[in-house]
Image (cartoon, rainbow, N blue to C red):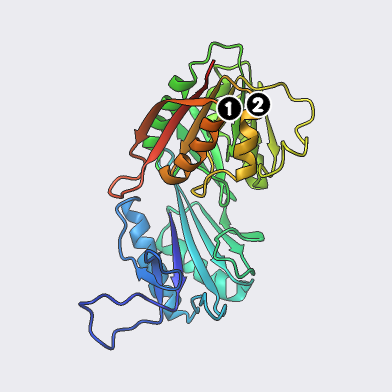
Amino acid sequence: MEFTFSKNRWILDDEPEKVESDFALGMHIPKRWDKILDIKSCDLMPDVGSKIINFVRDLAKKSKLKPYDQRSHVGFLRYLALRFGQNTNELMVNIVTSYEDLDMLVPFVESLVNEFPEITSVVNNINTRKADVSFGEREILLHGKPIINEKLKDLTFQISANSFFQTNSLMAEKLYDVILNSANLKGDEIVYDLYCGAGSISLFLARKAKFVYGFDIIVSSIENAEQNAIKNNIENIDFSVANLDSYFERKKSKNLPSPDIVIVDPPRSGMHKKMTEYLPKFRAKKIIYVSCNPSTQARDAQILKSHAYELKKLTVVDMFPHTPHVETVGVFEKSK
């Protein structure tokens, strides 16, 4: 779960006129990039997460650590990201700042860990760019390990701060069951997993496929994926750092065998148009499109349809309970 610091707090209609408005830790108001709704609790994560949010907010004010202002680009604290190993009880806190200042941050982290000894990892990602993203240019380990572990079914995964991994482990297992059933692997298939993150889908597929190739642009994700393959003794798998906007078009995939099945699990923005248009060139018998944004999935589906791929099945997974967001799995097959 990711929360944003801001000096521009959204004021609710029932709040008094002179209420404090220059510090917020929470989530963006829809269609407003400059206002943050202060969050006191979040039912999408364990109770300790809400306690950490409130403690961090109070401690930051007490320590006079300034929240980042997206308009003026002034301030220190940018994001607070919490990662939970729901099946391992491990917990990572990622504090994203606009610059490095360990003199301010180390005492802050010491107080945080003393209050919450269940925290197993604290990292500081430093994002000096103006872009409103929590991904830092570099990372400093401040407490514990640089990763946390999580178990899904009988596989164990290590996850770093910037690696993609599903936020809801219970429903991730359900999601992966849908993907595996949709793939219907017989054991002789070559599978490509595009936007593979820390390799969780890839590793489940590899136990039933001939070979799996995973691709992702984030270096730390691929490093995690490679370690996860070793940790789980899975050898029929290979991971590559790849900018999928142009990776295959520029022939950087070298002499890889053609895939029988392609899995795509892009970010909310969907696939880049170049990747969507290149996808049919694989001539895969089946494309399984996993999405957290049905609108961009529908957009990309139109391109697949124009290349004679037919949507055979669509499954909805309630990955984000208590919200209007869902995960969808679309199965596309090449028309004969």
Between tags 1 and 2, which lies in front? Answer: 2
- Residue 139 % position (x, y): 64, 59
Crowd class of label 2 (few under 14; some 14 to 19; many from 20; radius 10 Å): some
Residue type highlighted by circle 1: Val
The extreme front residue here reads 306
Quarter of the rendering occupied by the C terminus: top right
Q: Is residue 85 visible?
A: no
Residue type highlighted by circle 2: Phe
14 lies left or right of 202: left
The residue drawn where x is 32% and y is 57% is 42
Q: Circle 1 — which element?
A: strand
Crowd class of label 1 (few under 14; some 14 to 19; many from 20; radius 10 Å): many
**Foreground of the two, 301 or 178:** 301
Q: Which mark is residue 262?
A: 1
- Residue 142 % position (x, y): 59, 61
Quarter of the rendering occupied by the N terminus: bottom left
The residue drawn where x is 57% and y is 77% is 73
298 lies left or right of 105: left
The residue drawn where x is 73% and y is 38% is 249
**Foreground of the two, 117 or 79:** 79
Q: Quadrant of residue 173?
A: top left
Q: Which mark is residue 282?
A: 2
Is 331 placed above or below 17 here?
A: above
Q: Circle 2 — which element?
A: helix
The residue drawn where x is 54% and y is 11% is 186
Q: Is residue 23 visible?
A: yes
Is 136 placed above or below 184 here?
A: below
Q: Quadrant of residue 232?
A: top right
CB atoms of marks 1 and 2 within 8 Å: yes
